[in-house]
Image (tube, rainbow, N blue to C red):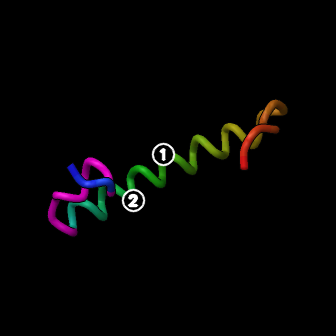
Amino acid sequence: MSTLGPVDFRPGKERTATYAKAMKRQAKLNKKLNSSPSATSGP
């Protein structure tokens, strides 16, 4: 297994779609976290 992640062996288009979906999910999570008053942890 590569260190790039579990999707790095897929075709480029599929990997891009998976990445976009993951980023969209992460953005939704971040928005939910940022609207929360306890969002003080992080880098």
Check disc 2 and report its element: helix, strand or loop: helix
Check disc 1 and report its element: helix, strand or loop: helix
Where residue 1 appears, as percent x and y from the top left, is 20, 49
Against 7, is 42 above or below?
above
Give the residue at x 57% y 45%: 28
Against 37, is 15 above or below?
below
Q: Quadrant of residue 31?
A: top right
Against 8, is 38 above or below?
above
Q: Quadrant of residue 4?
A: bottom left
Against 27, is 35 above or below?
above
Find disc 2 in the rendering and name its residue: 20
Q: Amino acid at mark 2?
A: Ala
> How many numbered marks appear?
2
Give the residue at x 24% y 58%: 8
Tag 2: Cα neighbours inside 10 Å, few (<14), some, or many (≥20)?
Answer: few
Q: Residue furthest bottom?
A: 12
Find disc 1 in the rendering and name its residue: 25
CA separation, marks 1 and 2?
A: 9 Å
Q: Earlier in the sequence, mark 1 or mark 2?
A: 2
Magenta span of residues = 4-12
In contact (CB < 8 Å): disc 1 and disc 2: no
Q: Amino acid at mark 1?
A: Arg
Where residue 2 appears, as percent x and y from the top left, is 25, 54
- What is the magenta segment's predominant secondary structure? loop
Whether the magenta-drawn stretch holds residue 43 is answered as no
